Amino acid sequence: MGICDGILTSAVQAATESGASRIERIEVSIGELTEVMDDALRFAFEALKEGTMAEGAELVVHYVEARSQCTECGAVFRHDRFDPKCPECGSYVITLVQGRELRIDAIDVE
């Protein structure tokens, strides 16, 4: 609920500041390492948007896969949260490139 509340509060604030009367759609990018659960996020969005200028709005979620760069050999690779091992050299010394994002990409308003 907290993450969705933050998204909705930020979107309403931005829409209000731009003079909008209604939010039609909110697009967000969420990295898979944030451990945000899609069902919980959508449930919270449906519950929290009622009675706000986002009532009736659509939530579009773009999930960003986890990718890291190996600091030993430079390979960039996809991985999950449990096994960030470089597939080229086997090193666990890596730098996360993407996968922890949590941002609002766009707000469509009327």
Image (cartoon, rainbow, N blue to C red):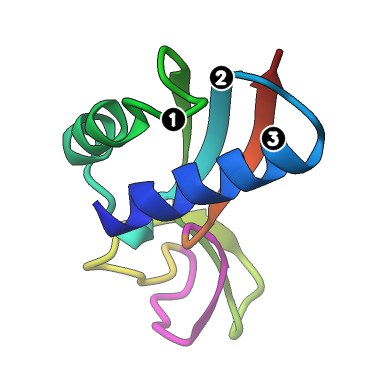
Question: 94 or 106: which is nearer to us?
Answer: 106
- Going from the N terminus, do you reach mark 1 or mark 3 first? 3
Instruction: Residue type at mark 2: give it.
Output: Arg
Q: Marks 1 and 3: CB-CB under 8 Å?
A: no
Find residue 93 and report its horizontal and vertical position in percent.
47, 87
The quadrant of the picture occupied by the C terminus is top right
Q: CA distance from mark 1 to mark 2?
A: 13 Å
Which residue has dot 2 on it?
A: 25
- Going from the N terminus, do you reach mark 3 or mark 2 first? 3
The residue mark sitting in front, 1 or 3, is 1
Question: 66 or 62: which is nearer to us?
Answer: 62
Q: Residue at x 56, y 19 (%)?
A: 25
Find residue 39 and report its horizontal and vertical position in percent.
18, 32
The residue mark sitting in front, 1 or 2, is 1
Q: CA distance from mark 1 to mark 3?
A: 11 Å
Which residue has dot 1 on it?
A: 52
Q: Marks 3 and 2: CB-CB under 8 Å?
A: no
Q: Residue at x 44, y 69 (%)?
A: 86
Find out whether residue 34 is within the magenta segment.
Answer: no
Find out whether residue 96 is within the magenta segment.
Answer: yes
Q: Residues within 10 Å of mark 1 (few under 14, many from 20)?
A: some
Instruction: Residue type at mark 3: give it.
Output: Ala
22 in relation to 41, above or below: above
Instruction: Residue type at mark 1: give it.
Output: Thr
Question: 20 or 44: which is nearer to us?
Answer: 20
Q: Which stretch did the figure color magenta?
A: 88-99
Q: Residues within 10 Å of mark 2 (few under 14, many from 20)?
A: some
> Is residue 33 rendered to the left or right of residue 103?
left
Dot 1 falls on a residue whose secondary structure is: loop
Q: Quadrant of residue 66?
A: bottom left
Q: Quadrant of residue 56?
A: top left
Which residue has dot 3 on it?
A: 15
